[in-house]
Amino acid sequence: MNRTRRLAALTLLVAPALALGPAVAAHASTTAAPAAAKCNVEVDSAGKYHLWGEGFPAGTTVTYSGSTSGSVPIDKSGRFDLGGLSGAKYVVKTADGKTTVTCAMVQH
């Protein structure tokens, strides 16, 4: 088989793959949007408050303010968990300032 025929045969094999490549790649890279950040406050059995949140950027830190203030790291799942607090009203902010969430009191 001469070179021209081999290139023509190769083109027939490769062209469909190249045409589908971007469509398949675009489909494969689509992921669900991250859940909206939220946080909640609960009262534990000792009468202390428990603050937890989810949907935050993984591997970052958020600050919380209310009766007590501080910062807490976000785990790889986008969550944080903090117990032993003295108040029920908190606001949580991401370090970049793009997300601010007022935490809701959860009644059981």
Image (cartoon, helix red, strand yellow):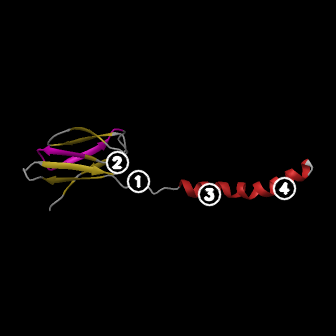
**Residue picked out by circle 2:** 78
Residue at left 33%, top 38%?
A: 95
**Residue type marked 1:** Pro
Residue at left 27%, top 50%?
A: 53
Cα separation, mark 2 vs mark 3, equals 29 Å
Which of the marked residues, 3 or 1, is nearer the chain's N terminus? 3
Residue at left 13%, top 44%?
A: 84
User: In the rendering, which numbered label is found on residue 24?
Assistant: 3
**Main secondary structure type of the part rendered in magenta:** strand
Residue at left 17%, top 49%?
A: 50
Cα separation, mark 4 vs mark 1, equals 45 Å
**Residue picked out by circle 1:** 34
Cα separation, mark 3 vs mark 1, equals 22 Å
Cα separation, mark 2 vs mark 4, equals 50 Å
Cα separation, mark 1 vs mark 2, equals 9 Å
Provide the residue span drawn in magenta: 81-95
Which of the marked residues, 1 or 2, is nearer the chain's N terminus? 1
State left or right for residue 88 relative to residue 16. left
Q: Look at discs 4 and 1 and give the one toward the viewer.
A: 4
The answer to whether the residues at label 2 and label 4 have Cβ atoms under 8 Å apart is: no
Q: Look at discs 2 and 4 and give the one toward the viewer.
A: 4
Q: How many marks?
A: 4
**Residue type marked 4:** Ala
User: x, y percentage for residue 81?
Assistant: 23, 46
Which of the marked residues, 4 or 3, is nearer the chain's N terminus? 4
User: x, y percentage for residue 79?
Assistant: 30, 48
**Residue type marked 3:** Val
State left or right for residue 86 relative to residue 22. left
The answer to whether the residues at label 2 and label 3 have Cβ atoms under 8 Å apart is: no
